Amino acid sequence: MPGFWKRLFRPKKGDDIFCAAVVPAAGSASRMEGQDKILAPMGEWPVLLHTLKALEASAYIREIVVVTREDQIVPVSQLCRDCALGKVSKVVVGGPDRTHSVLNGVREVSSRAGLIAIHDGARPLVTAEIIDEAILQASACGAAAPAVPVKETVKLASGGRVEHTPDRSALFVVQTPQVFDADLIRGALGKAAEEGAALTDDCSAVERLGIPVTLTRGSYENIKITTPVDLAIGEAILNWRDAR
Ligand code: C5P
């Protein structure tokens, strides 16, 4: 861990933890074949409502900032009101890419938050255990995210030709919530945006500063709704959970 970060970062005890959640939900859903994934029904509720209820249930999360597309500010705000989501403090407009959307949310977080958990709006099946483990780990070391081992063999390829087969035992799929010391993630995302770095998750913003991220236990159930079949898989997981 770089020395400056060790000097800045002070681990927190359980009772002192004030974590804010930022929920990026402002994507264009370009892989959903015209369906809107954030407000699409999955079981009894829209996808985003599952996500927000899971975050609300964590005692460490004290406030939630939802980031949405401009055309969805009204329905998303209405959903939060109708469902009495008491921890949702703000619904704000996102940016052209994920990093800018998250930055817009992070800037609206209360100054009392020592930790920020960034969780995809499109990841509705996250559990309390996954959320709390990532938060506790981040409170101890500054940056943590849940992950699961890769099940398939992965190929690096270019133009349809395999270039390399990485060792599967060292590969993990990272999920959200990704949880960080609040000052660290503000700085890291600001720098990434300034430098035009194309990032697909928030850990990458911290990694590029040379600061380590700890992986916690994720779950194969904590899927991201990306293509239409994921809604059917999400419903199947809900039914499977009910039947257990
Ligand atoms: O594109 P991807 O599936 O990785 O998006 C992950 C999350 O980031 C989704 O919840 C999506 O709504 C959000 N996102 C966003 N603003 C963007 C692009 C994606 O909030 N410009």
Image (cartoon, rainbow, N blue to C red):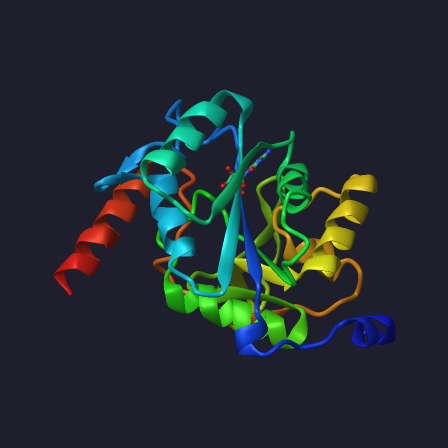
**Quadrant placement of the N terminus:** bottom right
Name of the residue lying farthest toward the left:
243
Q: Position of residue 170 (x, y in %)?
A: 57, 71
Q: Residue at x 49, y 65 (%)?
A: 60
Front residue (pair 121, 59): 59
Q: Above or below — where is 77 with respect to 123?
A: above
How many numbered markers are drawn?
0
Q: Above or below — where is 78 with respect to 10?
A: above
Q: Position of residue 94 (x, y in %)?
A: 60, 32
Taking the image as shown, residue 202 lies to the left or right of residue 153, namely right
Q: Above or below — where is 234 with respect to 59?
A: above
**Quadrant placement of the C terminus:** bottom left
**Which quarter holds ligand 1?**
top right
Name of the residue lying farthest toward the right:
4
Taking the image as shown, residue 132 lies to the left or right of residue 171, namely left
Q: Residue at x 71, y 70 (%)?
A: 212
Q: Position of residue 104 (x, y in %)?
A: 66, 38
Q: Residue at x 49, y 26 (%)?
A: 73
Residue 199 visible to an observer of this rendering? yes
Q: Above or below — where is 239 with respect to 230?
A: below
Q: Position of residue 78 (x, y in %)?
A: 39, 29
